[in-house]
């Protein structure tokens, strides 16, 4: 059923509002990655000389160029980790707009959702961002014991957090924060699985730029499906 929710989200990519939000989201994500990359290059230029004196070899030129090329590969890998907080920040900025577009097309009989003030969503997202960073720092201890299963642990940890946040934000619009917590506890397994399935493609460079929008739409479908089963 979760895959059916995802396929419905994919099917709405032609929606004008989806394209607008996705364009903004991709632009902001790329701007963040380019900004971090630029700072990293500036650090390399500051920290390394033009030539390095190696014993018995002499001066070696082009070290900055070599490190610059290596830094490009490093930033591609770093984007895997950066997209997790980007996806969390997305909830406070655009989730309401995506959820409304989904409801207008697929659930037109529903009464209008309650408007959650932007600042409330933004504060919630900032708090969640702090939790996401703290939990991932703590999870570094687990990675030492996970061996080849490090990606699975990484997806499971972040999937739990992202699923919790996205579902809560979507559900709060319709049934309030207290009702969202009750429903989230009741279906925590499905929500965790959906979040993990969202976290996995966030680890794929370029593909991860599209996931925040698709994730918001998928969790909107997931919420309404679970709500109808009560």
Image (cartoon, rainbow, N blue to C red):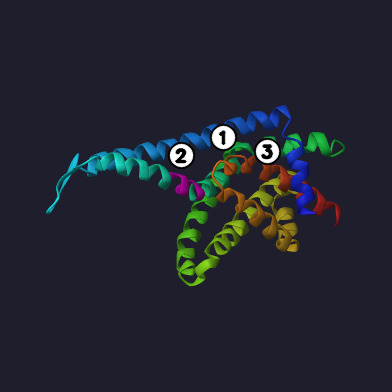
Tell me how far mark 3 sits from mark 1, CA to CA.
Answer: 17 Å
Q: Which residue is mark 2?
A: 33
Q: Which mark is residue 96?
A: 3
Q: Earlier in the sequence, mark 2 or mark 3?
A: 2
* Foreground of the two, 52 or 99: 52
Q: Residue at x 40, y 40 (%)?
A: 36
Q: Which mark is residue 26?
A: 1
Between disc 3 and disc 1, the foreground one is 1
Between disc 2 and disc 3, the foreground one is 2
In this picture, residue 13 sits left or right of residue 117: right
SS at circle 1: helix
Q: Earlier in the sequence, mark 3 or mark 1?
A: 1
Q: Is residue 64 magenta?
A: no
Q: Residue at x 27, y 40 (%)?
A: 64
Q: Label 2: how many residues lie within 10 Å, few (<14), some (14-19) or many (20+)?
A: some
Q: Which residues are magenta?
A: 75-80
Q: Is residue 78 magenta?
A: yes
* Foreground of the two, 36 or 192: 36
Give the x, y percent position of residue 128.
55, 51
SS at circle 3: helix
């Amino acid at each position: 059923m979760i895959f059916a929710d995802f396929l419905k989200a994919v099917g709405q990519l032609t929606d004008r509002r989806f394209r607008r939000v996705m364009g903004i989201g991709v632009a902001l994500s790329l701007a963040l990655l380019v900004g971090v990359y630029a700072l990293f290059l500036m650090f390399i230029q500051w920290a390394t000389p033009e030539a390095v004196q190696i014993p018995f070899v002499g001066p070696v030129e082009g070290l900055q160029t070599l490190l610059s090329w290596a830094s490009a590969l490093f930033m591609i890998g770093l984007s895997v980790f950066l997209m997790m907080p980007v996806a969390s920040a997305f909830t406070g900025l655009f989730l309401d707009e995506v959820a409304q577009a989904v409801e207008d097309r697929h659930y037109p009989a529903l009464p209008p959702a309650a408007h959650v003030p932007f600042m409330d969503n933004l504060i919630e997202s900032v708090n969640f961002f702090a939790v996401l960073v703290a939990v991932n720092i703590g999870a570094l201890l687990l990675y030492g014991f996970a061996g080849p299963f490090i990606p699975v642990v990484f997806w499971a940890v972040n999937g739990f957090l992202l699923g919790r946040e996205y579902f809560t934000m979507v559900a709060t619009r319709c049934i309030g924060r207290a009702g969202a917590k009750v429903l989230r506890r009741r279906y925590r397994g499905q929500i965790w699985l959906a979040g993990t399935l969202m976290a996995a493609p966030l680890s794929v460079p370029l593909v991860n730029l599209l996931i925040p929008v698709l994730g918001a739409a998928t969790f909107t479908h997931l919420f309404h499906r679970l709500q109808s089963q009560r």
